[in-house]
Structures are given as structure tokens and as C-alpha cells.
Image (cartoon, rainbow, N blue to C red):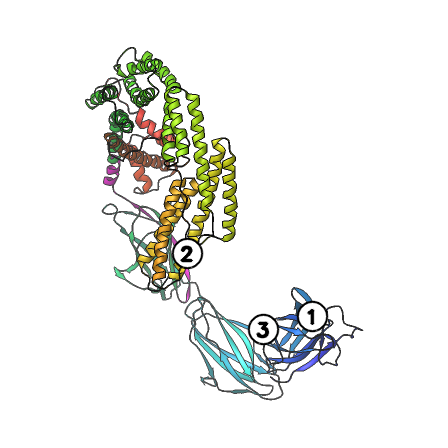
Amino acid sequence: MAAVALVLSLVSPPAAFGADQIQFRLSPAGAETSKISLTVPAGETGGSVTVFLGQSGDQPLKVRFLPRLDSGALMVLDESNQQATGITLPPLGEFAVVQLRVSVPRPGTYDGSLLVLDGGALRGQLAIAVTKNTDAGLRLDGASGGSLSMESPVPEFQRAFRVLSTSGAPTPVQLRVSPLTDPLSMQVPTTVEFSGRRYVGEQLVVPAQGELAFTVAADLPVGGDYRGTVAVVYGTEPLLVDLIVRRTRVTPTVAVDPIGTVQARMLWGFRPTDVDVRVLLRETNGQRVVLDAPALIALTRDTRGGPVAADYDTVQVMVDGRRTETVTLEPNQTREITLRVTGLSHPGKYTGSVRLASGDTSALTSPISILLHQGILLAALAILLGVAISAVLRWYLTAYRPALTSQLRLSRLRDDLDIALKHLTPLDEQTEVPLKRTVQEQLDQLRRQYGQRERTGEADLTSAADKANRLPTWIRLRRAVDAAGNPTELVSLLSVVTAYLEADLVDPQRDALLTEADRALVELKSKAKPAATLSRALDALAADASGRSDVLAHVDAAKEAMRVGKMQDANARYSEARLGLARELTDEVNRTATGTAPIGVDPTDWNNLKRATAAAARTARAATVPESAETAYRDASRRLFGILIAGLRVATESLRKVTQQPSAGAAEDKRFGTLRMTIDQADKATTAGDMPAARRHYEHARSLYENLEKEAVTTGRMGPSKNPVATAPSVAAAHLAWRPAEEKGPTTEVRLSSATQIRIRQLVFDSLTNAVILVVAVGLGLFLLFVPDASWGGLEDWLTAILWGLGLHQVGDSVFGGFSGLRRQFATATQPNAAE
């Protein structure tokens, strides 16, 4: 680094440092300064200066630097000459030493600063001004503001340049000219010549008060701005000048006759078609002109949403029947050329422009349009298609679908009855089976009538549905009456319903019989069902309390009381049995939450669980009603299972990490996946409150884990576990089993019944109908909103033809009613008249 002239702007030293401020000096004994000015000699790129930093505090202070120099570089170096982003300042009375190094590219004045920060607070600021001396009296003739612009009307660019010197002594220099770049940022070959020979980088001398001439040449094939740089290097300092060469073009002396509109027909229906566009050129200035092959630009197809890019393959230029890449016009010659657009695939109106140009001339454009249409046979085919669709829709909506609907309803009634009765089996052969056969025969008789196209009234269908829906209810209530001891009143009510079910479908008294039957069913439900419900609840409770003698004693007492007609006593015994079962189950949960925490369970969580289950056991023992004890058990069991499942999940992941080997195969991964899935099932069952399912899944997961752990211990991949996996407590056979079981709906296997088959057929036809009507609706909307082009064959023309075939020939004068409107129009307007 060369010597640097240093100029200091000093400020008067204060009597004492400001509070927590940084002091800048050029020497330990020097005066405090807030600004440094550096001067860089010509030919050098930068300089440096040493600065001493002090502070006003009595403790070391760690600071960081934020250097800045406009259009240049400012770097802070520590005492080891390494770049520093910060430094630790010693206490008051001592100084830290840094070196400021600047680098500037060109002559001029540069302003900068050095900010010293403590965290986000500014603790000191040093202003820096750098002045780089001007060049050695050299300049490039014609350059202004560091750039030189010129024009070239021809591709062969060649221009002489002069380096002028105002120095009193000769100046040795080197020339460096970068290749010019075209408007597309591509470099073009650029050469430099000196004294009639190619310059290859040797050193040249600019005479004192004299000039140095050289020539730059390049090939500029296309119009636009070409850019490069000319550098005159003296010492280590270049004189840089941006070179801009504008390649201008002249207007060709060619006229293009208006092309107008080209009409063409698509061959072979929908196959892509080639279209010829003829262009007539005339030379107008009596000189020979060579043009590049005309180009077709911006060819678009008009649509309602605006122009879209045309879909075609290529554009071929033909002159006298032969393809060509250039077109030559002799003085005052008129010549016809052909542009063949190949592969146009859509009919419609196309617009674009034909462009004529050459390397030395500006472009000429002429607009064109193409109308492409299809033949008349395709239009006739579209109309026939619409007529056929209309006929099929009319037949389906007026004849076939109503018959399918009636058959479907009867088949569903029969299937629903079979499913309902299946869950009431076995049926009583003397009373239930004969009545079942009576209702089924009535349904079969109606279905046979529809199969033979015999008309049946809606009332018969309704009556059949009423009987099919009430027969399962009658069977359940008859059994409830049996369970209640067959009281005379209930048997009498049951016989009213039986009379209705046995009546014929066409019985004139069927409405009155139905009214009486419904009244009897309501009364039967209110009187017969409670006794049967309590009996089922006692049976379920007895199953849940298997092996618990105290609870079973209460259950037996309740059954005996119900048998002799003492319902109040039976209910009291039933409540005592529920209370006793809830207490015992809660105690079992409390006994499970003892000892040390199982594997995977946090000891703190386990201790909290102990306290919670103990509190639940006390609550259950103190409860006087079964609901309170049941709530205590439910809360305690859910909390226990939640902690056990979470602990097993943690233990599983730990075991997986410990036993994971690079050679572990898919079988081991599958076993861990099965274990995780089983844990998830246990967690879901716990969340849903299904404690028996939660216990079953947990025990299965526990068994899987112990097998994997035993295998890991056997193979030496881990030691034996200190804490075992906890065993889940026993639970009732069903969730909240001490509550009366609700009647569950029928569950049956999936089978393809005749009703399902008919419904599938109906869905198929409905889907086809809706699809066709949707297409028609979309087509009608497009037809009403879309103005056809001058040529036929576009999408809107095909839709118009189909709508005509459907008989909607006046859609242009009607209001569009939407999809449902078209469906109503097909379903109602096409009904056969009375004469038919």
C-alpha cells in the first residue's frame, strides 16, 4: 500500500469524556478528533490510517463496528491485521488500536463514517472523507460524463478513437476494450487496431501534450444499442469510458398490398388444415432489395373471453412454389409470395400480422385475417344428434322412470321388512310367522302387478308401507306383553293391532283400522315396555357383575320383586345393585394405581393419579345414589387408562430407539407399527368412554411391548427394565353396563337385493339424464350469450345445432330457466296428450 496523505479535522478536546462516549485519537497523546480526511494519490486504489479508541468507563466495554463508505470500501483491522467487526475497549486511561483501510475505484471525493455500537446504542461516530487525486491528465476524445455514444447505420462498425494528454511528460498506457454486447446481451466479435496492425495488449506511450490514436471494429448484425467499455490503463489506475454504439436501420423501399380476409374450409371434419395466405410485394424506389422471409406474428383466434393464441404447427414461406429463406425484389418489381400456415386445428376467425424486415432495414407489418369453417354434412349430423337425444329423454322421463320408481318403493319395503324381522328371530311359529307371511304376500302381490304393467293406486302403496313399518313394532310389543305376564288389558290392545295387520290392502275400513291400531300401539308402548326394559337391564347388570356375590344378590331380589308385580321394590333393588357394582369397580381402579410408576409414566403424574383414584374411591363409598358412584368410577378409570396408555406410548418410542439397528428389516418396523396402532386404538376408546374396549386394546398393546422388550433383552441390545408395564384393572362387559341397555338398530350384512338392483338402474338413468340436461343447459347458455363468428364450425355452432335438434329453436327470444327449468321442460312439456 502506497503512502497516503493524511489531513485531520480536529475538535477542541473536552475537559472530560462525555458519559459512556467513545474517544477517537491518532496517537495516545494526541487530541480527540471526530473526523479524518484521507487523500489517495493518482494510480493508487486506497490507503489506511491507525486510530486509537478509548472510553470513559472504569470497566472493559465490548463494542461492534459499523463501517460505511459511499461507492467504496471501508474495512476495520485489529492489531493482528485481521478484519474486525468489533473489539473490547479497555477501562479509562487505556486505548485500543485499530487500522482503518479504504479502497476507492475512481478519482473523486467519497464520504463515509465509522459507527461504534454497544448493543443497539450508538456510543461513538467518526466521520471519514476520502479524496482520490485525478488521473495523469488523460482523457478520451469525445467522452462526456464517463461515456461515449455514437451511431452506425451499417453492420460493419469501425471507428477511430484518440487518447489526449495534458501532462508535461510522456505517459505509458495500455488499452483494454471489452467485446460489445448486442440488445439480447450476446457478445459480438470486437477488435482493436493500432498503427495499422492488431493490438494485442502491449504497452503504448501517450506523448507529452499529445495524443494516441487507435481503431475499434465490430460486426453489428441487428439494430439496437451495443454496449462495451474502453479502458486506458496507466500505472494501476484505469481511465474507464462506457461505449454505446446505436445500430440504426433504414426503412425498406417496399410496399405491401392489403392482404384482407382469407376464407378456407376444414377438410375431413376435425383434422388440422393448412391455409395459404398470399402477400403481394412491390419495390418503390428503383433499387434492389433483399428481405428476410416474411414472418407471421401474433396469430390469435377470437373467442368470447378475448383472443387466444392460435394452435398451429409451422409457417412456410413459398416463392414460385418453392420454400425460401429470403425474398429478393429487383428495382420496381412486383412479386407474390405465399405464407402456408400448417396444422390449424380449430374453426373460427384468426387475426395476426405479416412482418417484413432485413438486417439493415426496419420492419414493415400488414394485418391479416383467416376465416376457417367446417362442411354442411357435419352441421346436419349435429342436428340429428339433438333430435335423437330429445327422443330418448322423452321416453325415459314419461314412461320408464315412473315404473322404476314404484318397483323401487315396493322392493325397499320388502327388504326393510326382512332386515327388521331378521333381528327379531326366532319368530313365534303360531302368532308371529303367520302375520309376517300375510304382510309379505301383500307386498309381493303389488310388485307382481307393477311387473305386469298393471296400474295400482297410491293408496295401496301407502297402506302396504304402513303395515310393513308397524309389523316389527308389533312383534317387539307382543314380546314385551309376554314378559309382563300377559295382562288382559295389554292382550286386548295387541289384538287391535293384529286385526289391522291381517286386513286386506283394499279393505274399505283400512283407514279406521289404522287409526285404532296406532292408538293401541301408543298405549302398549307406555305400559308394556317398562317391565320388559327393567328385565333386560337386570340381565345386563347380572352379566357385568359376574362373580360379585353382593351385587348378584341385589339383582336376584329385584327379579323376584318384578315377578310378583312389585315394580317399586324391584327398582329399589336394581339401584342398590348398581351402587354396589360402581363401588367395587372404583375400588379396583384405586388398587391398580399403587406401587411405583409403571414404565414410561412420570412419577409425579403417577402420584397425582394415586390421590385422584383414592378420592374417587372415597366418593363412591360415600355415595347414596348410583349415579354419583358411577361418575366417580368413570372419571377415575378414564384418568387411569389415559396415563397407562400415554406411558406405554413413551416406552414404545424409547424401546424403538434403543433397539433400532441399521440392519433392522421391514418385519421389525411392522411390529412396532402394529404396537403403535394398538395404542392409538386404546387411546380412542378411552376418549370415547368405552372402557372395556380400552382395556382390551391396552392389554394387547402391553403384550406386544413385553414381547419386543424380551427380544431386545435376549439379543443384548438393552438391559432388563426396572419398572414393569402396568396391568389394566377389570371393567364391566360393556360401557356403563349398569345402565339399562338401549335398543340397538339392526345390523346386517351388505347384500345386493332386488331393491338395490332397481335403484342402481334408476341412478344410472338419472345420472345420464342429468348429464345430458346439463350439457343442454350449458349449451343453451353459450348460445344465448355467444355471438357466432362469420364461419361455421366452432363450438358455439355445434351447440346451436344440437339445441335446434332438441326443439329449442326459439331460445334467442326466451329467458334461460337454468338446469331445473330445462328438466321441468323435458318432464312436463313432452308428456303425451290425451288423444295419444
Classify 385 as above or below 487: below
Name the kind of residue labelled 3 in the image: Ser
First in sequence: mark 3 or mark 2?
3
Tell me, for residue 776, which label it has, or none.
Answer: none
Q: Mark 3 highlights which residue?
A: 144
Using the numbered discs, state the Cα–Cα distance from disc 1 to disc 2 in whole angstroms. Answer: 58 Å
Using the numbered discs, state the Cα–Cα distance from disc 3 to disc 2 in whole angstroms. Answer: 76 Å
Q: Quadrant of residue 139?
A: bottom right
* Residue found 60% across the figure and 73% down from its top: 72
* Residue found 37% across the figure and 39% down from its top: 787
Q: Quadrant of residue 82?
A: bottom right
Q: Mark 1 highlights which residue?
A: 125
Viewer-closest of 138 and 363: 138
Residue 399 is situated, as x and y percent measured from the top left of the image, at: 24, 25
Front disc: 3 or 2: 2
Classify 827 as above or below 9: above
Name the kind of residue labelled 1 in the image: Gln
Residue 248 is situated, as x and y percent measured from the top left of the image, at: 46, 67
Q: Mark 2 highlights which residue?
A: 653
Name the quarter where the N terminus is drawn: bottom right
Name the quarter where the C terminus is drawn: top left
Name the kind of residue labelled 2 in the image: Glu
Can residue 571 be seen by looking at this rendering?
A: yes
The crowd level at tag 1 (other Cα within 10 Å; few <14, some 14-19, many 20+) is many
Q: Quadrant of residue 658?
A: bottom left
* Residue found 48% across the figure and 32% down from its top: 627
Q: Disc 1 on helix, strand or loop?
A: strand
First in sequence: mark 1 or mark 3?
1
Q: Disc 2 on helix, strand or loop?
A: helix
Looking at the rendering, the stretch of residues picked out in magenta corresponds to 359-383
**For residue 433, side relative to residue 630 (left or right):** left
Viewer-closest of 43 and 130: 130
